[in-house]
Image (spheres, rainbow, N blue to C red):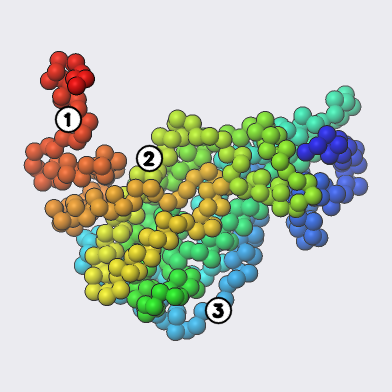
Amino acid sequence: MTDDESEDFRDMIRRFLENGEEFDVAEFAKAAGLPGDPASIQAMLAQFQAALSQGGEGITEKLVRDTATNAANAKAIAVSPAVLDTANSALQLAALWLDEATSISPLASTPSLMTRPEWARATIPVWIQIAEPVARSISRAAEKLLTEQLPDDDDIDARQEGAFTALGRLGGTLFSLQLGQIVGQLSEEVTTGSDLGIPLLDGALDHELRAVLIPQNAAAFAEGLDIPLHDVVLYLAIREIAHARLFKHAKWLKLALIAAITEYANGISINSDALRDAMEDVDMSDPESLRRLVGDGALIPPKTDDQLVALARIETVLALVEGWVDVVANQAASRLPSRDAIAEMVRRQRAVGRPGEKALAGLVGIEARPRRLREAADMWKRVHDAVGADKRDALWDHPDAVPTAEDIDNPAALISRLTGGPTIPDAMDVALQELLDNDGTVDEN
């Protein structure tokens, strides 16, 4: 923002503080880089008025929900009865096949179908829980930055200062709009309720997940695969129900995963200096410029040491969950001739990442995809081959029994513990023992 633009912005704020009723919200939208169409301006004005009256900061749930629903509805279409019948039958058959692949009991609630808008609305509470810390940090940084522009006049009363504070909270409004758009975009991309790995849909019990298929997206995923639609949907249904069964069995897992993600997000702190620096690259004539400022990750600071530890813990849990689902789903789908081809497409899509996932990573600073999924899946397969499904699944009985990142690195040691065999040292144990054998000296040869 140039000096002239900054002065114009300050003049506009002064006019608002002095004559709130005459404030030109269209002028503000233009100066702030917000969309200039009448509908968007009115939405912004409504949210601004709500901030004045309620004094809140951070995410506005209604704005996120309305934005996400509108975005999801934009490309939602009616699904043919044939596709709906295929999806329903796939859910029923998937549950039966899973009974043969895992000892974990069936769900308390019946798996069901969802439309894109229904998925968007149902998942919003979890998205807000995850994103709220970042939204509040942006709002506080914006409020501090705007306060620095407040004229040093002694006659500015508390009402005017309160109005200025509310103006700073428009950062939360921008964040809410962006989050809603991203959730709407994700609703076009996910094929099932657990497609992103994060537990988003509540089931019949607090710790459970609701297993759902999104028929429109599942059918779109099957396009161009040269594989019968029923086979594709059946494989996706097996994965979805396996995922939901795991969270039903491991009652602690949902809370632990969301708590870890929230802890990571709470560590994100955006200061006003970073916001000011980022604002220098904002093109005030570009309506999308400020939206990109909030949504492309430019404001997210480098990860702290504590965040790196939290992120590693999240990635390990996600890898363990998704790896287990991969193994169990492949076993349950052993009768499916096209199983390997469909599984490869799922892995490829996961590796590439979808636009909505990338946008979410830019907004809240975390990626939903685990990096060590293949290694975790290989560990679960080796455990199953060594001790069977019952002992494999019993590792989810308690958080202390769940394999660790070290177990992913060294499955042989885990298997040895499970079978009561001799402990197999890993590379670090070997190096330490060699050091002790050499009386603490290092052989430099």
Between disc 3 and disc 1, whose residue precedes?
Answer: 3
- Residue 430: numbered disc: 1
Q: Residue at the spot x=44%, y=46% of the render?
A: 258
Q: CB under 8 Å between callouts 3 and 2?
A: no
Q: Is residue 27 left or right of residue 254?
A: right
Closer to the observer: label 2 or label 1? 1
> Residue at the front extreme?
445
Q: Nearer the viewer, residue 292 or 54?
A: 292
Q: Nearer the viewer, residue 274 or 45?
A: 274
Between disc 3 and disc 2, whose residue precedes?
Answer: 3
Does residue 384 appear in this view? Answer: yes
Return the x and y of residue 98 as percentages of the image width and height. Answer: 26, 67
Q: Label 3 amino acid?
A: Ala
Q: Label 1 amino acid?
A: Val
Q: CB under 8 Å between callouts 3 and 1?
A: no
Q: Element at badge 1?
A: helix
Tally the numbered discs: 3
Q: Label 2 amino acid?
A: Arg
Q: Residue at the spot x=66%, y=49% of the render?
A: 292
Q: CB under 8 Å between callouts 2 and 1?
A: no
- Residue at the disc numbered 3: 78
Q: Element at badge 3?
A: loop
Q: Nearer the viewer, residue 419 or 114?
A: 419
Q: Is residue 13 left or right of residue 57?
A: right
* Classed neighbour count for the residue bearing mark 1: other residues with Cα under 10 Å, few (<14), some (14–19), many (≥20): few
**Quarter occupied by residue 323:** bottom left
- Residue 313: numbered disc: 2
* Classed neighbour count for the residue bearing mark 2: other residues with Cα under 10 Å, few (<14), some (14–19), many (≥20): some
Between disc 2 and disc 1, whose residue precedes?
Answer: 2
Closer to the observer: label 3 or label 1? 1
